[in-house]
Image (cartoon, grey):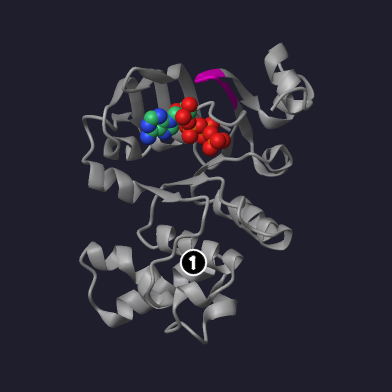
Amino acid sequence: MKKEIKFNIEDLDLFYGEFQALKKVNLEIEKNEITAFIGPSGCGKSTFLRTLNRMNDLIENVKITGHVTLDDQNIYNAIDVIKLRSRVGMVFQKPNPFPMSIYDNVAYGPRVHGIKKKQELDEIVEKSLKNAAVWDEVKDRLKRNALSLSGGQQQRICIARALAVEPEVLLMDEPTSALDPISTLKIEDLATELKKQYTIVMVTHNMQQAARISDKTAFFLLGELIESDRTDKIFSNPNDKRTEDYITGRFG
Ligand SMILES: Nc1ncnc2c1ncn2[C@@H]1O[C@H](COP(=O)(O)OP(=O)(O)OP(=O)(O)O)[C@@H](O)[C@H]1O
């Protein structure tokens, strides 16, 4: 099958003030795959993830050079940032539902985009909750505050909220690090299911997780992308000694 590139990143440098957090990163991210970013704490994984929907723009003194394209369009000058974020949704480490009902959480994005009809919103909410594999657990209590749910359910509500605006890409920044093992497996199964429709990019501290669910893995160290390849290759026969040392637990 011909590979389809969703994101193409070329020579990306990112500075927080004087500090260079990303150094000449080059990477292609394929459509309908899960790409995992691994590497020790502080190596730039989250920073890199945030460059893909321009979340770093919100931080003062950030300077970015290089190119990032989404379907061949430069996201830093050819796409409106609001439009970009509706195409590239994000789920964070700690579940962060808004302090409102389950229904209103999921309907939030569509309402911001101007959808007002109740029937239409009802359909979007149901479809998004189903796609996030949490519908059966919440369908009888959509008016309840989302904060009353378990952490794992809250995270799936956040995924439903991201899906409700029909993005093409889902960025996940350590989406299971605050969850118990059962909720973690649910999110992993969900990601595997969602990649049929979406492109998923995930930061994870958990190497077993990267090995279990991702198609490609990219290993970062001190702001450099050391290597990226098929996940089975990275975990069985990496090219770089530093990748091998990291995945075999020699540092971390
Ligand atoms: N807003 C910021 N201002 C200044 N420096 C920052 C900022 N955010 C991150 N950094 C620095 O950039 C580097 C990369 O941080 P980043 O959070 O991207 O790493 P990470 O690999 O995701 O780490 P972790 O796995 O611990 O989340 C670190 O040295 C961090 O201190």
Pick the residue in front: 59 or 64.
59
Q: Secondary structure at mark 1?
A: helix
Which residue, as the protein is rendered here, is positioned at the far front? 18
Q: Is residue 248 magenta?
A: no
Is 176 drawn above or below residue 143 in the view shown? above
Please give the name of the residue rendered at 61% of the width and 40% of the height, measured from the top-left corner: 204
Pick the residue in front: 167 or 85.
85
Quadrant position of the N terminus in the picture: top right
Please give the name of the residue rendered at 49% of the width and 38% of the height, measured from the top-left corner: 31
Which residue, as the protein is rendered here, is positioned at the far bottom? 140
Residue 58: percent from left, percent from top: 28, 40
Residue 194: percent from left, percent from top: 55, 54
Q: Is residue 113 left or right of residue 195?
A: left
Which residue is denoted by mark 1 in the rendering?
157
Please give the name of the residue rendered at 69% of the width and 28% of the height, measured from the top-left corner: 252
Q: Is residue 4 among the parts visible in the rendering?
A: no
Q: Is residue 209 left or right of residue 198?
A: right
Mark 1 surroundings: few (<14), some (14-19) or many (≥20) residues within 10 A: many
Q: Is residue 241 among the parts visible in the rendering?
A: yes
Q: What stretch of residues is rendered in magenta?
A: 219-225
Q: Quadrant of residue 39?
A: top right
Residue 151: percent from left, percent from top: 58, 65
Please give the name of the residue rendered at 56% of the width and 45% of the height, measured from the top-left corner: 174
Q: Is residue 224 magenta?
A: yes
Across the whole image, how many numbered discs are drawn on residues? 1
Residue 206: percent from left, percent from top: 68, 41
Q: Quadrant of residue 110?
A: bottom left
